[in-house]
Image: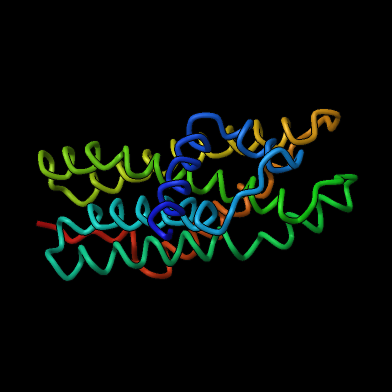
């Protein structure tokens, strides 16, 4: 029973990553009611992506740095995504949105899940450049480019999902991801995620 639920959750995550707009619309329109394993699988995708990418950020510092950065990347990203979430729903509602809280949460969760997968896909880039040019400044530049690319991609996914959920609204609340990026940058700096050991 649990195995079937988890398999169903993973199948739905595949749909959420292939067509995030349709996935969120099915929930919002009441065509599909996703059970808890689906929500958990979306969250797990984000956690796995940020943890494994964070681990590659610690390659210059040894085993301790690898595990520390894997944990800190996930913690910082999770806090940056979760802290502004109530503001997303409240300010979006005040600006005329009629989305339910669960639809707003699902749109955000699909976006961060997609971002986690993008981080996972970026691991070979970071690994290759860290191994070939193990200079702290260059590794920092590569990671900043990856984070910027993933952030822009997440903004596009979130904008498309929100536009599909409320096609009559002129503007999607992408300011939420700008706030996520600002909070994430502060947390990454505070925890030393972008401090790379010089070899």
Colouring convention used in this rendered image of the protein: rainbow
Residue 134 x %, y %: 13, 47
Residue 77 placement, left or right of 70: right
Residue 180 x %, y %: 58, 54
> Is 49 or 178 nearer to us in this picture?
49
> Is 156 or 9 nearer to us in this picture?
9
The residue lying at 78 percent from left, 34 percent from top is 171
The residue lying at 16 percent from left, 56 percent from top is 59
Quarter of the figure with residue 126: top left
Q: How many marks?
A: 0
Residue 130 x %, y %: 17, 45
Which quadrant would the N terminus be assigned to in this image?
A: bottom left
Which quadrant would the C terminus be assigned to in this image?
A: bottom left
> Is 14 or 169 nearer to us in this picture?
14
Q: Is residue 72 above or below residue 176?
A: below
Quarter of the figure with residue 195: bottom left
The residue lying at 63 percent from left, 31 percent from top is 22
Q: Is residue 44 above or below residue 160?
A: below
Farthest front residue? 1
The residue lying at 42 percent from left, 52 percent from top is 4
Residue 68 placement, left or right of 184: left
Residue 137 placement, left or right of 23: left
Quarter of the figure with residue 193: bottom left
Residue 48 x %, y %: 35, 54
């Amino acid at each position: 029973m649990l195995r079937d639920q988890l398999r169903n959750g993973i199948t739905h995550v595949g749909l959420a990553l292939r067509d995030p707009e349709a996935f969120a619309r099915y929930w919002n329109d009441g065509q599909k009611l996703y059970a808890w394993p689906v929500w958990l699988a979306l969250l797990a995708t984000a956690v796995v992506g940020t943890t494994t990418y964070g681990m590659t950020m610690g390659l210059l510092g040894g085993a301790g740095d690898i595990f520390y950065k894997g944990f800190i990347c996930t913690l910082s990203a999770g806090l940056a995504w979760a802290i502004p979430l109530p503001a997303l729903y409240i300010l979006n509602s005040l600006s005329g949105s009629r989305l339910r809280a669960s639809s707003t949460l699902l749109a955000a969760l699909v976006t961060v899940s997609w971002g986690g997968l993008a981080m996972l896909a970026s691991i070979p880039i970071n690994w290759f450049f860290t191994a070939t040019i193990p200079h702290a400044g260059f590794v920092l530049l590569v990671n900043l480019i990856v984070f910027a690319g993933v952030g822009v991609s997440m903004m596009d996914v979130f904008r498309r999902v929100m536009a599909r959920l409320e096609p009559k609204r002129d503007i999607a609340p992408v300011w939420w991801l700008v706030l996520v990026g600002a909070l994430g940058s502060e947390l990454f700096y505070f925890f030393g995620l972008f401090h790379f050991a010089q070899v």
